[in-house]
Image (spheres, rainbow, N blue to C red):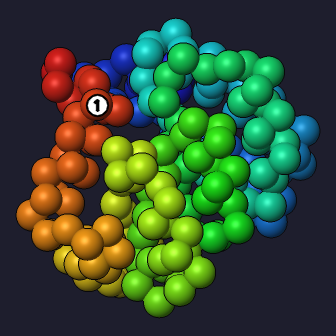
């Protein structure tokens, strides 16, 4: 069923998928499903939106074993302590409303290459403009420059958007 959905024109990525110690079925079952999603991502050349809660070591191990060719976007990157590790693994991060108030995250974000960032609101009530404003401030660039960069990042990662 999911494979049929992935093939639809409007599907730009696989996920949000991943591992979560706090919710969902047993971790072993999550790993099986996650591996299936990785296989689909690679087969259909689609990026993956990664959900990871208290499973960084497992996620990192899987990534190192699989060596995916497709981009993995770490959704809701809000833990400053993980940012450097996520970058070492070659992933893109998606930053949400936590950046507005989380000073440790603000400091860590300065070390992230701007072409490895996406912006999201997810389940936050914060306006996307506030998130863009804070990130532009952190990088010392205009909001317009940040918007152009994020759009470039989006089009590079979600190639199906460009190709229809």
Indicate the position of residue 1 as horizontal and vertical percent values. Answer: 53, 23
Q: Nearer the viewer, residue 17 or 159?
A: 159
The reply, left or right, for residue 130 in relation to residue 79 is left
Q: Nearer the viewer, residue 101 or 19?
A: 101
Q: Residue under circle 1?
A: 156
Q: Is residue 134 visible?
A: yes
Tally of marks: 1
- Give above or below for 66 relative to 95: above
- Give above or below for 105 relative to 35: below
Indicate the position of residue 89 as horizontal and vertical percent values. Answer: 65, 38
Residue found at the far bottom of this picture: 101
Which image quarter: residue 22? Answer: bottom right
The reply, left or right, for residue 5 in relation to residue 105 is left
Q: At 64% from the left edge and 55% from the top edge, which residue is drawn?
A: 84
Q: At 69% from the left edge and 50% from the top edge, which residue is drawn?
A: 85
- Give above or below for 113 relative to 125: above
Indicate the position of residue 132 as horizontal and vertical percent values. Answer: 25, 71
Q: At 80% from the left edge and 61% from the top edge, which residue is drawn?
A: 54
Q: At 70% from the left edge and 67% from the top edge, which residue is drawn?
A: 81
The reply, left or right, for residue 125 in relation to residue 161 is right
In the picture, the quarter occupied by the C terminus is top left
Residue found at the far top of this picture: 43
Q: Nearer the viewer, residue 45 or 105?
A: 105
Q: Is residue 76 visible?
A: no
Q: Secondary structure at mark 1?
A: helix
Dot 1, how many residues are within 10 Å of its Cα: few (below 14), some (14-19), or many (20+)? some
Indicate the position of residue 114 as horizontal and vertical percent values. Answer: 35, 52
């Amino acid at each position: 069923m999911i494979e049929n959905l992935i093939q639809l024109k409007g599907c730009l990525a696989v996920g949000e998928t991943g591992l979560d110690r706090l919710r969902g079925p047993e971790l072993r079952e999550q790993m099986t499903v996650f591996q299936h999603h990785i296989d689909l991502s690679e087969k259909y050349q689609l990026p993956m939106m990664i959900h990871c809660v208290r499973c960084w070591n497992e996620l990192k191990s899987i990534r190192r074993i699989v060596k995916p060719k497709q981009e993995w976007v770490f959704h809701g990157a809000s833990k400053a302590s993980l940012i450097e590790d996520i970058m070492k693994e070659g992933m893109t991060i998606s930053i949400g409303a936590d950046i507005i108030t989380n000073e440790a995250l603000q400091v860590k974000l300065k070390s992230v290459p701007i072409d490895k960032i996406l912006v999201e609101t997810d389940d936050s009530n914060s306006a996307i403009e506030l998130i863009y404003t804070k990130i532009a401030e952190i990088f010392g660039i205009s909001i317009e420059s940040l918007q152009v960069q994020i759009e470039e990042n989006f089009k590079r990662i979600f190639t199906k958007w460009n190709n229809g």
